[in-house]
Image (tube, helix red, strand yellow):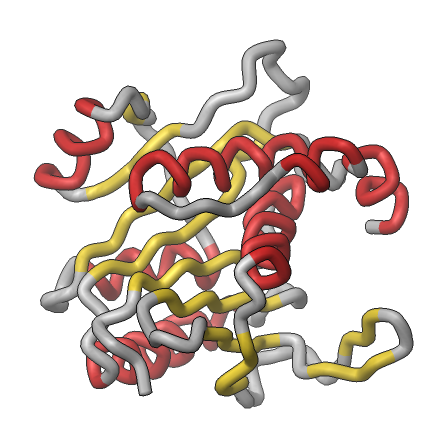
């Protein structure tokens, strides 16, 4: 039973920053799995962690149903992105979700010294982010399932927003994920502790 939840989504993108961030949020907020997505557009594979098998495309929630986190650990087939995005947002609207947040990286050759989060959203949300000190990204493309979901939001009564941080495509980046989580803490009054993510950054990078 979800209660107009904030939906936070992370997928397998540059630096894996979205996936790392949402996985850490799930752990620190002790969210419970409530659903998973099955589709012919998900590659024929299963993932496992600490020896436990699990669906690659999962949905979690807190006990109050106020936050809902979606994670997919496999890249999806591009020809199925629209179908999956439409299905997921049908479900989200039915649960009363008013805002969908995508966490992702945008590819760069080398990481900047100062790690920042940038916002791409509709006008009202952009103003709020700027007032809170989050910079806008001037131009670019969000692709894959994340882009399909944001594109679908534009035609619905649900606000889509992307928080992006620079990432090297094939280099797992826990520090970039930390930057995204700290932005969520600022904008949505969350209290997700990132100390462990910072302390174990090198270990996490090697594991991934």
Residue 144 percent location from the top left of the image: 48, 58
- Residue at 57%, 67% in the rendered image: 30
Q: Nearer the viewer, residue 149 or 141?
A: 149
Residue 167 percent location from the top left of the image: 61, 31
Q: Nearer the viewer, residue 76 or 88?
A: 88
Q: Residue 148, relative to residue 91: is it above or below?
A: above
Residue 159 percent location from the top left of the image: 18, 56
Q: Nearer the viewer, residue 95 or 46?
A: 95
Q: Residue 98, relative to residue 117: is it above or below?
A: below
Q: Nearer the viewer, residue 189 or 202?
A: 189
Q: Residue 184, relative to residue 98: is it above or below?
A: above
Q: Please identify the quarter of the rendering in which residue 154 is found.
A: bottom left
- Residue at 77%, 32% in the rendered image: 199
Label total for image:
0
Q: Quadrant of the N terminus?
A: bottom left
Residue 12: tell me if it is visible.
Answer: no
Q: Please give left or right for residue 151 compared with residue 62 in the image.
A: left
Q: Please identify the quarter of the rendering in which residue 162 is found.
A: top left
- Residue at 84%, 34% in the rendered image: 202
Residue 200 percent location from the top left of the image: 80, 38
- Residue at 60%, 79% in the rendered image: 42
Residue 203: tell me if it is visible.
Answer: yes
Q: Please identify the quarter of the rendering in which residue 71 is found.
A: bottom right
Q: Please give left or right for residue 90 compared with residue 37 in the image.
A: left
Q: Residue 204, relative to residue 33: is it above or below?
A: above
Q: Please give left or right for residue 34 compared with residue 14 in the image.
A: left
């Amino acid at each position: 039973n979800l209660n107009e939840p904030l939906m936070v989504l992370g997928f397998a993108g540059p630096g894996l920053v979205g996936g790392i961030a949402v996985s850490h949020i799930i752990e620190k907020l002790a969210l419970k799995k409530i659903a998973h997505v099955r589709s012919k557009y998900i590659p024929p594979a299963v993932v496992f962690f600490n020896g436990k098998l699990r669906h690659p495309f999962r949905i979690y929630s807190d006990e109050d149903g106020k936050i809902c986190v979606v994670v997919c650990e496999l890249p999806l087939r591009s020809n199925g992105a629209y179908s999956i995005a439409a299905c997921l947002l049908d479900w989200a609207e039915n649960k009363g979700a008013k805002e969908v947040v995508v966490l992702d990286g945008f590819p760069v050759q080398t990481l900047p010294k100062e790690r920042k989060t940038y916002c791409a959203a509709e006008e009202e949300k952009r103003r709020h982010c700027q007032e809170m000190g989050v910079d806008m990204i001037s131009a670019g493309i969000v692709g894959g399932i994340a882009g399909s979901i944001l594109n679908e939001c534009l035609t619905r009564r649900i606000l889509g927003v992307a928080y992006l941080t620079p990432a090297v495509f094939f280099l797992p980046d826990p520090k970039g994920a930390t930057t995204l989580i700290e932005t969520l803490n600022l904008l949505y009054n969350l209290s997700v502790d990132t100390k462990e993510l910072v302390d174990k950054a090198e270990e996490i990078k090697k594991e991934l």
